[in-house]
Amino acid sequence: MDTATLVTFIIYLVGMLVIGIISYRLTSNLSDYVLGGRSLGPGVAALSAGASDMSSWLLLGLPGAAYASGLGSIWLAIGLTIGAYLNWRFVASRLRSYTEVASDSITVPDFLENRFKDKSRALRVISALVILVFFTFYTSSGLVGGAILFQESFDMSYNSALLIGAIVIISYTFLGGFLAVSWTDFIQGILMFLALIVAPIVALTEVGGWGSTMDQVREIDPTYLNAFTGMTGLGIISLLAWGLGYFGQPHIITRFMALKSTKDVPKARWIGMTWMIIGLIGAVLVGLSGIAYFADAPLITDAADNSEKVFILFVDVLFNPWVSGILLAAILSAIMSTIDSQLLVSSSALAEDFYKAIIRKNASDKELVWVGRFGVILIAVIAVLLAIPGNPANENASSILDLVSYAWSGFGAAFGPVILLALFWKRMSRNGALAAMITGAVTVVVWKQLTDSGVIPFSLYEIVPGFILALIAAVIFSNVGQGPSDEMEKEFDEAAANDITK
């Protein structure tokens, strides 16, 4: 790596660390640590939600998918765009209102317990368990992205790069604190946005412009420019269904909970959706231009598939060292912005929803923060093991997209139907919520295993059956046993009254 690139890279890391330290000093209690005292403005909420959402998938996974399959990857981008918009349009304001009405809930498990007045704590514990399990896989995807970045940038072996990348990211995240995570994610979101504007423009120009690039891609294989090539009806449904996942992603919807006011939602939605659409288009263009640029030295061969390195390779060959350092920092931003959010949510679940709820009900804030930090290290270690190629526990998840796909479907099916019905169906009960959560999570795990083993003879993204069966379970079991109490119905009406989207 050039010295200028390395210097730029280090300056970025130090800058993020300084922001983290300053924000950490503003965190005085568990509520601040978990939710930042509900103080986020629309810009910070929107970009931090987007950055923690997209992660290394946007700069590595999606360009790689576009390089490998051409415009067939666009169905995934369309599904995500629709899902994100609906999430901002309907869930954001109602959830911000309802979590405050429901005993000022500060985590998703906390909200579900308070929303359904669950004295058994089953909702809190099971939802926290779902968070810990699936975020471990999600964090692993980020560590794979970090390993690829350090491997290519510093000419390391994959395992060495994985370890060093993990140490860098964990050290930064260990500072903790929602404000630190949100503000660093805000800066990182800006970097990612700029990278996905600059990189495709320079790449297309280098190949000869839009027309020349498309002509070269068409000459290599015209099917790259056909969004329906190799697609089946179930395949398109599976890619579009990624949008269903947004309603149940804890690291995204906590940004809604942290907004200063429901009045900030429309502005945050406009900022967030603009950022997302331009970013997705830029990522697809990077992959398509890579097909033409690397035609003489393809990234996919019989020996290896390096398609997810297309953005990194462009950074290396197209830009001067100072700009390369900034763009590499953008990739690390994508990785860090998601992992820090995921580890924070996971550590909050471990501290607030397991340790305090079951082991030590009178634990002090300081004690809970340290339990959370221990959880960060524990989850990160497991995620590192999952990210090692050839690990038996991860035989079928060798790429960033594979790992993200599994975790995304798990959260989408387990929490998505529960969150939607909890916010918009007054007759939803504790039994319905519990049944939906368990059904969604179990369906995703079982469907994935049956598909990978060939028992299910067709390919359908596991979030589809998981989401549908969870909805059915919610409706059936909400009509079994005791229905919502008068207090629950009163809180529902109060939350609805404060929802500006009605």
Image (cartoon, rainbow, N blue to C red):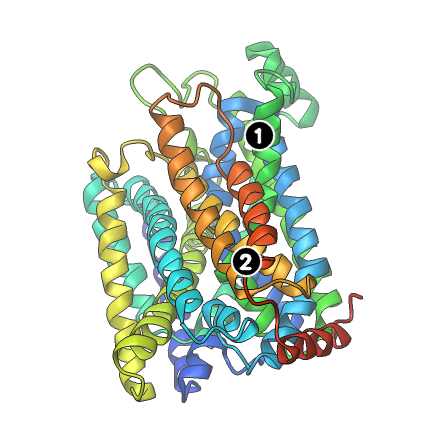
**Quarter placement of the C terminus:** bottom right
Relative image position of residue 132 (x, y in whole percent) = 34, 58
Circles 1, 2 touching at the beta carbon (< 8 Å): no
**Sequence-wise first label, 1 or 2:** 1
Q: Secondary structure at mark 1?
A: helix
Q: Nearer the viewer, residue 24 or 396?
A: 396
Residue in the image at 24% along x and 64% along y: 377
Q: Amino acid at mark 2?
A: Gly
Residue in the image at 32% along x and 34% along y: 398
**Quarter placement of the N terminus:** top left
Residue at the spot of label 2? 432
Q: Nearer the viewer, residue 138 or 97?
A: 97
Q: Is residue 50 left or right of residue 9?
A: right
Q: Secondary structure at mark 2?
A: helix
Q: Is residue 34 left or right of residue 105?
A: left
> Which residue lies most toward the front here?
481
Relative image position of residue 247 (x, y in whole percent) = 59, 54
Q: Amino acid at mark 1?
A: Ser
Instruction: Give the foreground label among 1 and 2.
Output: 2
> Which residue lies most toward the right here?
502
Is residue 338 in view from this perspective? yes
Relative image position of residue 172 (x, y in whole percent) = 33, 67
Residue in the image at 29% along x and 63% along y: 170
Callout 2 environment at 10 Å: few (<14), some (14 to 19), or many (20+)?
A: many
Q: Quadrant of residue 301?
A: top left
Residue in the image at 23% along x and 41% along y: 388
Residue at the spot of label 1? 73
Q: Nearer the viewer, residue 68 or 215?
A: 68
Is residue 194 in view from this perspective? no
As measured in the structure, the alpha-carbon distance from the residue carrying label 1 to the one carrying label 2 is 36 Å
